[in-house]
Amino acid sequence: MIDYTADRRRIVRDRDIAKTRLTIGRAADNDLHLSDLAIEPQHARIEQTGASRIEVAATGTLGFALDGKSTDSASIDCRSGAELQFGGNRIAVSLDADGAVLLTVERIQSEAQSVDEERGFSLARVMPSRRLTAWLSAILILGLFLALPIISHVTRGPDPKVHVIGDASWTPGKLSLAHHALEQRCEACHVRPFESVRDSACLACHTDVHDHAPMARQAGARGDPPLFELFLQRVGRQFGKPGPGACVACHAEHQGAGRMEPAQQQFCAACHATLSERLTDTKLGNAGDFGTLHPQFKVQIVVDPTSRAMGRVSLDGHPRENGGLFFPHKLHLDPLGGAAKMASTVGAERGYGNRLLCKDCHHPTEDGVRFLPVRMERDCEVCHSLVYDRVGPTFRTLKHGNVAQMIADLSVAKPSWPVTAARPRPGAYPARGDYYANFTPPGGGVLQKAFTRDGVCGECHTPVYSGGRISVMPVTQSARHMMKGWFDHQDHRQAKCTTCHAAEGSSSASDLLLPGIAQCRTCHMGEGSGAKVPSGCVMCHSYHPAATAPRKVKPDRS
Amino acid sequence: MASAGQTGSRAQRRTVTDHEGFLRHARFRWLKLALAVSLISLVGYVAADGKVRPYGGSWYGYTLGTIGALLIVWLALLGIRKRAMTRGRWSLKAWTSAHVYLGLALIVIATLHTGFQFGWNIHTLAYALMMLVILSGIFGAVAYASLPAALSNNREQMTLGEMVGGIQAIDRQLLDAAQPLTQDYALLVLAATVQSPFDPGLVSRLSGRFPHCATQRAIEFLNLADITNPAVGRVETLLLRRKAQLDRLQRQMRLKALLEVWLYLHIPATIGLIAALIAHIVSVFYYW
């Protein structure tokens, strides 16, 4: 029997057993008593059946191993030897020098049971190494989110359809709706590595964007920024960041799917609030806040009715406009006047009520932003009839807008005056105060009478003579007066026309019925104000000059 | 006289610092500094004129980002700094105190740097890893402040070796005492003695529940055995003693696990964070 001391010295004890039959087990009455709990009290029996042959049979239920294989009976030739295993004991079978069967029992050393105590208590025994996970995560992150996109970007071909792989993980936020199509094509704007987005990338698509003003003027207007801003600009320039005039200086992208936010008031105010200090020759008034610092409106009006020349003048000078027409708004809008009476008698088929309203003559454009020019045939002729003759059941009417045609028509007419029944009309022209087209003068030519202040043409138009021919002053109706600002009537439809346009008190067409800035300020004040409608610059103005509405009032593109 | 006085005050100061934990170090000097830094960042954030809306690419965003990145690198350097334990003004304790409080201030700095813009991208990954590091760090600081006392109470003057040794001594007696038992019970006792107390995994160690405890199983089954057999009684007594010893060892293991587990997040997440931070910074300027 072989045993080991604590310091692993081998102790060999020999024992002769003069029996041909041995019992093996944990119980003390066995021939081979092995105090191993893995061994049954009566575990097995070994019987010598020949000179060098033994039979081994399990007597319990657990069996044993023969040369590593589990079994419950075995026949062994001791000359060739074998190894048996019972629980934690090994028995080598052989013959000794005398030819007797030799069973060498050896306790199997328990496999390094003594764990290093410190390590056993520590989590290090059951967790993967921190160093390993750290390196793995670092390599994974750098590989997927840095190396992959860069390699893909550097090695991609010139084909614009081939996109960079993996750069989706770089996008800091969704692009605005207008740029949605570029979502997967970072390289469309980020053209070169480590170079910030250049204007050229924007202008590749936005070919029709105009500069706010000539670059030199803009630079002059900007002046020197505050010291800290200047420092930041210098630093930015060192890294190749474009300066304050660049597209991206205002148009920030990756701010989430939605409309690109319009610029804030302070952008404009930075230059325009004190513009006159830097651009001493500027014609623009300083403007920093609609409520507190904004010049009076300059409106575009007719300055010469004959040549129809237009000019911009400030409303502060109470300008008057000669559009070539006589027209008293007061007369037409008076609810108790003749025009109201006439509207109620003749206008039923045109939808007039018992008085004339603005909408009866002024029709909005399709988009509702402005109004169509007033047209004689549609808007005036119901009352201001041009009928000059009756032939049987029908009437002959002068064609409006063509003087030569009118002369021709009247010269061949044999009118029986008056052709129409008299009807009341404002102004007491003929004898009884009744109105009808008065073509015949009491002793004067037909045409001359028509062009007098009381005549059918002259009551609205100014006659002009050129080259011996009679004609009328051209009529100019401005559809838009604020050429640099945007005003949308549709957005103000809840207000009455007369709230802003003082038409009810105007007796002359040359009265400019445009409200001044004070009128607007009853609702609109600057962006940060507590007014009913806080209004930034972009509500009315475009940074890039264009004929369309500014960004703020443009409908969503989606 | 003068020199004696000096020595005395120095000795006194040393005593004070020696009994002060890293959280209370120098009368919360670093806590105050961290609060001040957070407050200044916050005020700056409100005051800075974000042109469109706040984001990392504004000048204030770059400023906070630079401070945050430098802070992260410095905080990570504790891993190297801790290997040299020194005293004095720049002691390891001062460094650790600063590490904890400035690490907390990083929550404010980095969150403001994001401008509250989050998404499925490398930038938010870096932020998430940073928050993981900080939160695990908070767990660690709380654990370091509260668990060591419990750990030493549980040991009751024993060394870890003695704890294991005690169980091994009982095991030897058990193996001897169980010899007369029938095979079923003998195998139960054997299983109890061969089961290493250190086998249970992370969940068992953290929860303190060991559902596969062979000693417990042996005790339960031996309760059903013939109690008139004196051998059974002896084995049972030994098993109960083994269980008591094992309980103490398992409590020790649990406390140790709670004390260590955060590091398994804190350290790898820190390295992951530094990698994500590099990717974040490079990518931002690559596609500038």
Image (cartoon, coloured by chain):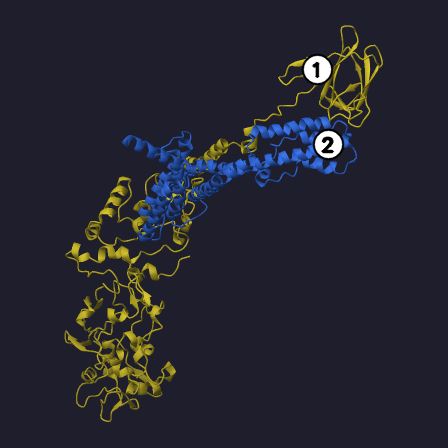
Q: Nearer the viewer, residue B230 or A18?
A: B230
The kind of residue tagged 2 is: Arg
Horizontal relation, residue B14 to residue A333: left or right? right
Secondary element at image label 2: helix
Chain of the residue under label 1: A
Secondary structure of residue under mark 1: strand
> What is chain A's hue in the picture?
yellow
Task: Give the quarter of the figure containing the C terminus of chain A.
Answer: bottom left
Q: Specify the farthest residue to the bottom.
A: A432
- Tell me which amino acid carries mark 1: Ile
Q: Chain of mark 2?
A: B
Q: Is residue B183 left or right of residue A399?
A: right
Q: Quadrant of residue B187?
A: top right
Which residue position is annotated with label 2? Answer: B234
Q: Which mark is residue A532?
A: none
Extreme residue in the top direction: A98
> Quick check: do tags 2 and 1 share a chain?
no
Q: Colour of chain B?
A: blue
Camera sees residue B184: no
- The 10 Å Cα crowd at callout 1, few under 14, some 14 to 19, many 20 or more, is few
Q: Which residue reaches farthest front?
A: B1
Q: Nearer the viewer, residue B258 or A77?
A: B258
Q: Which residue is mark 1?
A: A2
Residue A220 visible (yes or no): yes
Residues at marks 2 and 1, CA–CA distance in whole angstroms: 29 Å
